[in-house]
Image (cartoon, coloured by chain):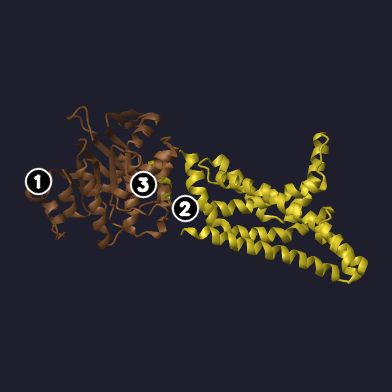
Chain colours: A brown, B yellow
């Protein structure tokens, strides 16, 4: 992961707000992330973590604030007749941004009617215009990296949850994303299978893949991340290095949250 | 048995007409049904409401009535409008059957499309696929698998419904069988016609079972 300008963040989030009706899910979210860094987002259910991730990946729209991805404005503050609003980038830019971000879903969302290799090759061929041969070679390479050699022709339903999640990571990587987002990647897995997925993500972190990971795995969040954000009630309560968030922060809500995880 | 040797060629002729109605109806009603299903899911009310109305009329009135309405209605309408146009019997039957079956297929397809999880769309979206690519490469192949059992029902019903074409004197299998019934003064021709329908549907059932099995390569 090379970045020409070391100090420029690859992901910049400022004062992001999001409401569903009267429910303010994200109140004022600001943080940034440099290329090659890993960010873990932790917090209780309903704290807005997943919504934040969905906003950053354009699956939801924000109501206020600024999001910048890889130097491109995705959304900037604006004004409308009703007051403060946001202005989204033109569709072409949004698509470029989307192509530079990948998302790994909690429940995989693999395409069930396609084989593992077809799952990996479909978008590179149809969207990026890669040669079928090259896409297959890249797919094979990624499967090997995921420890899934020999599963090319399997259908998702023939794989374990952990294997399916690794395929979905490979599928996202096949698009060469600059940032990879994970929405609770192990929450649908039993503890046995959780480990194999976390191991892969750790490996990606060692390879300096820029990642944003929403997770309930505290030990993992602490070990893999360069930066940790603790969210509660739609705000960032605490952010900093894992050491700071997990040990040195005196925040009461955070301490209370962490006390529920004996392994953290 | 000599009866049968004269009866069979006659009924076979009618059966060919029946098959033609059957085949052409499927050919037109399936794509039309898919289009209607997509329109019914439109986010615009001006599209959705007329389509809903169309479906409710097609499903809420007898096909028999629709055939008559298309055939005679087109005649009176063109008379009224002062243009020289009216359907021949056979095309009228095909139009009536197609728009009627399209309404049923549309509801089956809509159910199938809506049963696909939101996550499939989101995954495709995140991979940069266009809406068209998503529909034809991700959604539709999965819909096909889900709609086969319900569609099989419709297709089998269609074989039997073709007998309604006789209402505007299209000489399909049942119309001919009835004529022979009068000639023979026996229900024997009707029985033979019944065997034709039954065998046709038996073959279709086997075919659909095979298709379902073929599509069972994934869950």
Q: Quadrant of residue A87?
A: top left
Tell me which residue sits at (62%, 48%) in the image: B33
- From this view, report whether residue A53 is shown above or below residue A159: above
Local secondary structure at mark 2: loop
Q: Quadrant of residue B48?
A: top right
Crowding at mark 2 (Cα within 10 Å: few <14, some 14-19, many 20+): many
Local secondary structure at mark 3: helix
| Percent of width and height locating residue B120 | 42, 49
Q: Is residue B219 left or right of residue B192?
A: left
Q: Quadrant of residue A100?
A: top left
Q: Nearer the viewer, mark 1 or mark 3?
A: 3
The residue where tag 1 is placed is: A244
Local secondary structure at mark 1: helix
The residue where tag 2 is placed is: A113
| Percent of width and height locating residue B59 | 66, 55
Q: CA distance from mark 2 to mark 1?
A: 46 Å
């Amino acid at each position: 992961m090379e970045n020409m300008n070391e100090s420029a963040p690859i992901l910049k989030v400022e004062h992001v707000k999001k409401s569903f009706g009267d429910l303010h899910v994200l109140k004022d979210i600001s943080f940034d992330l440099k290329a090659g860094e890993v960010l873990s987002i932790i917090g209780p259910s309903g704290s807005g973590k997943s919504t934040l991730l969905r906003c950053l990946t354009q699956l939801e729209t924000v109501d206020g604030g600024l999001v910048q991805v890889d130097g491109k404005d995705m959304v900037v503050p604006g004004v409308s007749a009703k007051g403060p609003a946001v202005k989204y980038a033109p569709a072409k830019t949004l698509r470029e941004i989307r192509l530079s971000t990948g998302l790994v879903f909690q429940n995989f969302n693999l395409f069930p009617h396609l084989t593992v290799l077809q799952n990996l090759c479909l978008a590179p061929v149809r969207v990026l215009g890669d040669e079928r041969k090259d896409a297959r070679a890249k797919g094979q390479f990624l499967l090997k990296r995921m420890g899934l050699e020999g599963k090319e022709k399997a259908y998702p339903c023939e794989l374990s949850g952990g294997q399916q999640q690794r395929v979905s990571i490979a599928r996202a990587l096949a698009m060469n994303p600059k940032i990879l987002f994970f929405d609770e990647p192990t929450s649908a897995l039993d503890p046995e299978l959780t480990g194999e997925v976390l191991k892969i993500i750790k490996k990606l972190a060692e390879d300096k893949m820029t990642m944003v990971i929403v997770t309930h795995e505290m030990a993992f969040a602490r070990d893999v991340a360069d930066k940790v954000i603790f969210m509660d009630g739609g705000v960032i309560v605490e952010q900093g290095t894992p050491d700071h968030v997990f040990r040195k922060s005196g925040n009461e809500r955070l301490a209370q949250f962490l006390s529920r995880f004996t392994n953290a | 048995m000599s009866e049968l040797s004269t009866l069979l060629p006659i009924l076979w002729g009618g059966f060919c007409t029946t098959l033609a109605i059957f085949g052409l109806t499927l050919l037109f009603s399936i794509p039309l049904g898919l289009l209607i299903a997509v329109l019914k899911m439109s986010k615009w009310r001006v599209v959705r409401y007329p389509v809903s109305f169309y479906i409710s009329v097609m499903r809420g009135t007898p096909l028999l009535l629709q055939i008559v309405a298309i055939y005679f209605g087109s005649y009176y309408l063109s008379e009224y409008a002062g243009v020289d146009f009216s359907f021949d019997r056979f095309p009228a039957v095909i139009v009536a059957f197609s728009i009627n079956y399209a309404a049923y297929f549309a509801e089956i397809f809509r159910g199938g499309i809506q049963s696909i999880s939101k996550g499939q769309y989101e995954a495709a979206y995140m991979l940069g696929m266009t809406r068209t690519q998503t529909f034809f490469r991700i959604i539709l192949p999965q819909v096909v698998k889900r709609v086969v059992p319900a569609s099989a029902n419709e297709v089998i019903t269609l074989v039997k419904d073709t007998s309604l074409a006789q209402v505007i004197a299209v000489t399909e299998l049942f119309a001919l069988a009835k004529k022979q019934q009068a000639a023979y003064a026996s229900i024997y021709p009707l029985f033979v016609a019944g065997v034709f329908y039954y065998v046709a549907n038996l073959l279709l059932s086997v075919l659909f079972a095979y298709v379902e099995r073929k599509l069972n390569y994934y869950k």
